[in-house]
């Protein structure tokens, strides 16, 4: 039996290529889209007209939209891997609260670091353990190297 890995899939090129490469390397890949609260294709409504996520000068704004989830689903379907979309809206609210608290305290917040700790390597790892995965992966660039003197293998 191959090693199971949960892959954070954003719907973008990087995580899509990661899914393909992991599959080609023989991993049992499970795709996971982390929804942070954007559930539809509009950012907000002003009067009668909704403001779209898509802007004229770029095909997308940000990540984690419904169309991003659909893109990730299409890649997972094409590669014949299981796919889950989990709602992390409440947990993402914690990131926003952190940002506001730090900003109002006169400090420069780094929400990406907190998101990595709380969501990507917190909740994502929790999900991986629930489905029997030994590893988690994403489309972000990283090189995993063993730590000298450490007896357990490094995880990627």
Image (tube, rainbow, N blue to C red):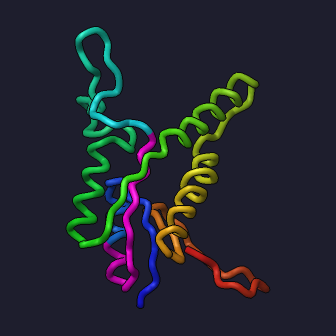
Residue 47 placement (x, y as % from top left): 28, 9
Residue at 29%, 34% in the rendered image: 40
Viewer-nearest residue: 65 or 149:
65
Count all numbered tags in the image, as a single digit.
0
Up/down of 41 relative to 1, above or below: above
Farthest residue, direction front = 130
Residue lying at the far bottom in this picture: please name it. 1
Left or right of 54, for residue 139: right
Q: Is residue 28 magenta?
A: yes
Q: Is residue 69 left or right of residue 145?
A: left
Q: Nearer the viewer, residue 99 or 1?
A: 1
Placement of the C terminus among the 4 image quadrants: bottom right
Which quarter of the rendering shows the N terminus? bottom left
Stretch in magenta? 20-36
Residue 102 is drawn in which quadrant?
top right
Residue 68 magenta-highlighted: no
User: Residue 154, located in which quarter of the rendered image?
Assistant: bottom right
Q: Relative to 48, does residue 8 appear above or below in the rendering? A: below
Q: Position of residue 52 (x, y in %)?
A: 27, 27
Direction right: furthest residue: 149
The residue lying at 63 percent from left, 53 percent from top is: 117
Asked whether, in this view, residue 151 is left or right of residue 71, the answer is right
Height in image: 24 above or below 43?
below
Residue at position x 58%, y 33% in the image: 96
Residue at 32%, 82% (x, y): give it. Answer: 24
100 relative to 109, above or below? above
- In this picture, residue 122 sits left or right of residue 133: right
> Residue 79, how many percent across, how many down?
25, 72
């Amino acid at each position: 039996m191959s090693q199971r890995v949960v892959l954070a899939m954003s719907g973008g090129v990087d995580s899509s290529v990661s899914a393909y490469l992991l599959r080609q390397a023989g991993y049992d890949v499970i795709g996971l889209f982390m929804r942070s609260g954007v559930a539809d294709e509009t950012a907000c409504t002003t009067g009668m007209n909704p403001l779209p996520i898509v802007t004229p000068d770029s095909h997308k704004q940000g990540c984690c939209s419904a169309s991003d989830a659909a893109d990730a689903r299409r890649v997972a379907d094409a590669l014949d891997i299981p796919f889950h979309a989990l709602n992390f809206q409440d947990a993402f609210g914690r990131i926003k609260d952190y940002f506001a608290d730090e900003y109002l305290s006169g400090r420069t917040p780094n929400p990406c670091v907190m998101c990595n700790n709380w969501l990507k390597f917190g909740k994502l790892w929790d999900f991986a353990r629930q489905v029997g995965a030994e590893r988690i992966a994403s489309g972000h660039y990283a090189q995993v190297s063993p730590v000298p003197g450490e007896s357990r293998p490094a995880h990627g």
